[in-house]
């Protein structure tokens, strides 16, 4: 369906600029997830695409046609809201068919469409109910069905799962992923939950402070974050950060800090050598540390285990490295006792270095 | 034993002052009126001296063409003021439900008429309707149109206009409050679904405001049946009986015709009418609550 392009999109409320020149392109049939902490501008961006917020500067192009002066209804889009935004005085069938009835489509077509989408989201038995008589998950499905019935090329989601409880959220996430494969649409999805972003997206756009920090496939963002913010935001449990300095000894490059002394190898060593500043932050994901008593001390961290969080097959160990806290993800079978000082091997390909002042990845 | 008794009596002791005041200020006069309505009662008599006549006063009124006329005027007055006030009040609320500069000052100005004492409103409008020096006729003179005998030929219309001027703000503020409590996202969803501003009003805003609007209309209706001061000051019920609403006729029956029993019976008829409206309003509220409770029960049963 259509391509969407945001060209230097700016949003101001009075004198306060909340979005600073967003540049983004969304290809046909792509599932794009805008993710970031609250107040990062992701919802504002989505609402500007929808036409619910005015564009202060810049332009939105749909199939290369500027649309920012158009009313929402002229933009060929459907939207699912965080609070579902159902019409409380209409029953499910009327909610689903509202757009079609406004467009004065023939009755037979409307009935067929309602039946179709109700079946798709599993609401066939509830068509006569008012939203007040539905559970949270069912209301969510009505909102989805209403958006599907519109047959528009662009599908917008504004935190659609955040009002559901954890179990239902997981189930709806899976259904959503399934639906996005079946329905060929350009989907834009806003969430603050990085797991939703990782599982649903073809492409993730990480936003922070009104700027796009990085965009790419879930794998790219996870493996090659461009800065410390993205590195810390993507992945659960979050990446460990340790402040350190680079120094060269006998041709090798080492990161030294409070409680650790790590020799770098491979690509990251080359990058570190080329970098001008010596003050850096070392980033290692909890999953890139593994318990190994006989590891090479130059390629390992020695940590004091303080707390063990058992989460099933995996356990998360909260440890101390000097004065900093480090999390390690281990197999729950690993024989670990609290209070022990243990050695954990560092996966060299999982070592990230960030400039300490600019926070940009080396 | 004694403390247990004292404990049980405590709530009643706290309620007693309110109950006593209610009994003196409300139940006593009401009972007095009902009792008096069964008597042929002249103001110079005490109620004990008045002759008991049973339902005679009620039957007399039932067949009295003047009472019918007065009741008709009241019903017409109430119907027109409430209908027109609802249309203008809700319309204004729909227009002013937006953020523009100075909107709060504008809203305050709109509700000013409601704050003026009814007698003052009556005097003001009587002056403006005055056939020679009144504002309206002087204006008609100045643009070369013939004068209108506002409080003569068009007396009922004129008092209706004055009432609309005073009470539309009441409906305006309640409608505005209802509008501003509507779910914003449902209206946004309607915009995305392709509803024009007008379609949003017809399909979303008005249906969602309806519970508030029904209660507002009933409140205004009850008030309109009891209106007295403005009309008393403006026309004193004339010319003829053309603006003699029930409240006015009751007061005249008691003071001018000196028939307290008939006046009391008339008051009771009005009271029954108002009671029916009030019961209707409560029934509507109860029905709404019951419906909400039923829906909740349905949801809980399933989850």
Image (cartoon, coloured by chain):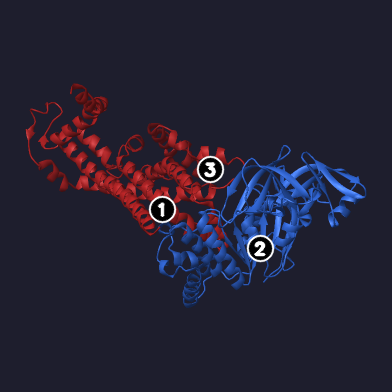
Of residue B162 and residue B207, the one placed in the foreground of this image is B207
Of residue A229 and residue B165, the one placed in the foreground of this image is A229
In this picture, residue B182 sits left or right of residue A151:
left
Cα separation between marks 2 and 1? 43 Å
What residue is rendered at 48% in x and 64% in y? A95
Give the labeled residue for mark 3: B142
Give the labeled residue for mark 1: B210
Q: Is residue A135 in view from this perspective?
A: yes
- Count of numbered labels shown in the rendering: 3
Crowding near pointer 1: few (<14 within 10 Å), some, many (20+)? few
In this picture, is A113 found above or below A269?
below
Q: Quadrant of residue A194?
A: bottom right
In this picture, is A170 found above or below B277?
below
Q: Which chain is blue?
A: A
Cα separation between marks 3 and 2? 74 Å
What residue is rendered at 52% in x and 47% in y? B144
Mark number, residue A201: 2
Residue B49: x, y in percent? 7, 28
Label 1 SS:
helix
* In front: label 2 or label 1: 2
Cα separation between marks 1 and 3? 44 Å
* In front: label 3 or label 2: 2
Q: Which chain is red?
A: B
């Amino acid at each position: 369906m259509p391509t969407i392009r945001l060209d230097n999109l700016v949003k101001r409320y009075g004198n306060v600029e909340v979005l600073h020149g967003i540049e983004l392109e969304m290809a046909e049939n792509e599932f794009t997830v805008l993710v970031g902490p609250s107040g990062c501008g992701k919802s504002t961006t989505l609402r500007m695409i929808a036409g619910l917020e005015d564009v202060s500067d810049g332009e939105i192009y749909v199939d290369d046609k500027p649309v920012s002066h158009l009313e929402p209804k002229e933009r060929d889009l459907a939207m699912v809201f965080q609070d579902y935004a159902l019409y409380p005085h209409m029953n499910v069938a009327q909610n689903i068919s509202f757009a079609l009835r406004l467009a004065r489509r023939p009755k037979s077509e409307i009935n067929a469409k309602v039946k179709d989408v109700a079946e798709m989201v599993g609401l066939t038995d509830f068509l006569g109910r008012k939203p007040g008589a539905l559970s949270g998950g069912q209301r969510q499905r009505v909102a989805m069905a209403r958006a599907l019935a519109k047959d528009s090329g662009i599908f917008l989601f504004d935190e659609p799962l955040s009002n559901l409880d954890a179990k239902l959220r997981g189930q709806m996430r899976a259904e959503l992923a399934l639906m996005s494969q079946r329905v060929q649409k350009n989907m834009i999805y806003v969430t603050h939950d990085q797991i939703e972003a990782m599982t649903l997206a073809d492409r993730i756009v990480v936003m922070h402070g009104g700027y796009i920090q990085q965009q790419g496939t879930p794998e790219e963002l996870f493996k090659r974050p461009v800065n410390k913010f993205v590195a810390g935001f993507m992945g659960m449990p979050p990446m460990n950060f340790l402040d350190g300095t680079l120094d060269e000894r006998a041709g090798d490059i080492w990161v030294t800090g409070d409680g650790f002394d790590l020799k770098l190898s491979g690509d990251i060593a080359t990058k570190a050598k080329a970098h001008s500043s010596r003050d850096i932050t070392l980033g290692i994901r909890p999953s890139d540390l593994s318990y190994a008593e006989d590891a090479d001390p130059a390629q390992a961290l020695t940590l004091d285990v303080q707390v063990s969080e058992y989460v099933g097959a995996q356990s998360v160990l909260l440890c101390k490295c000097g004065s900093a806290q480090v999390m390690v993800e281990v197999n729950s079978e690993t024989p670990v006792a609290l209070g022990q000082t243990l050695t954990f091997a560092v996966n060299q390909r999982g070592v990230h270095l960030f400039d300490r002042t600019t926070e940009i990845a080396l | 034993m004694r403390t247990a008794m004292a404990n049980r009596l405590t709530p009643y002791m706290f309620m007693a002052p309110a109950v006593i005041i209610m009994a003196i200020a409300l139940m006593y006069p009401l009972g007095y009126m009902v009792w008096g309505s069964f008597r042929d009662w002249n103001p110079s008599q005490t109620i004990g001296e008045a002759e008991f006549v049973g339902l005679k006063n009620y039957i007399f009124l039932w067949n009295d063409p003047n009472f019918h006329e007065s009741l008709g005027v009241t019903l017409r007055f109430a119907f027109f003021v409430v209908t027109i006030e609802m249309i203008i009040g809700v319309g204004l609320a729909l227009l002013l439900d937006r953020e523009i500069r100075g909107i709060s000052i504008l809203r305050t100005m709109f509700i000013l008429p409601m704050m003026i004492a009814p007698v003052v409103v009556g005097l003001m409008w009587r002056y403006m309707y005055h056939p020679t020096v009144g504002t309206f006729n002087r204006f008609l003179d100045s643009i070369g149109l013939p004068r209108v005998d506002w409080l003569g030929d068009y007396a009922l219309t004129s008092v209706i206009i004055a009432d609309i001027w005073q009470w539309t703000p009441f409906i305006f503020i309640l409608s505005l409050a209802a509008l501003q409590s509507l779910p914003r996202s449902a209206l946004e969803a309607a915009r995305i679904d392709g509803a024009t501003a007008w379609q949003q009003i017809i399909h979303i805003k008005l249906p969602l405001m309806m519970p508030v609007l029904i209660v507002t209309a009933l409140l205004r209706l009850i008030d309109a049946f009891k209106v007295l001061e403005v009309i008393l000051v403006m026309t004193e019920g004339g010319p003829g009986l053309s603006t003699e609403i029930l409240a006015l006729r009751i007061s005249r029956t008691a003071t001018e015709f000196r028939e307290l029993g008939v006046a009391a019976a008339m008051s009771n008829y009005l009271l029954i009418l108002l009671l029916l409206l009030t019961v209707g309003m409560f029934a509507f509220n109860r029905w709404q609550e019951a419906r909400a409770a039923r829906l909740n029960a349905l949801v809980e049963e399933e989850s």
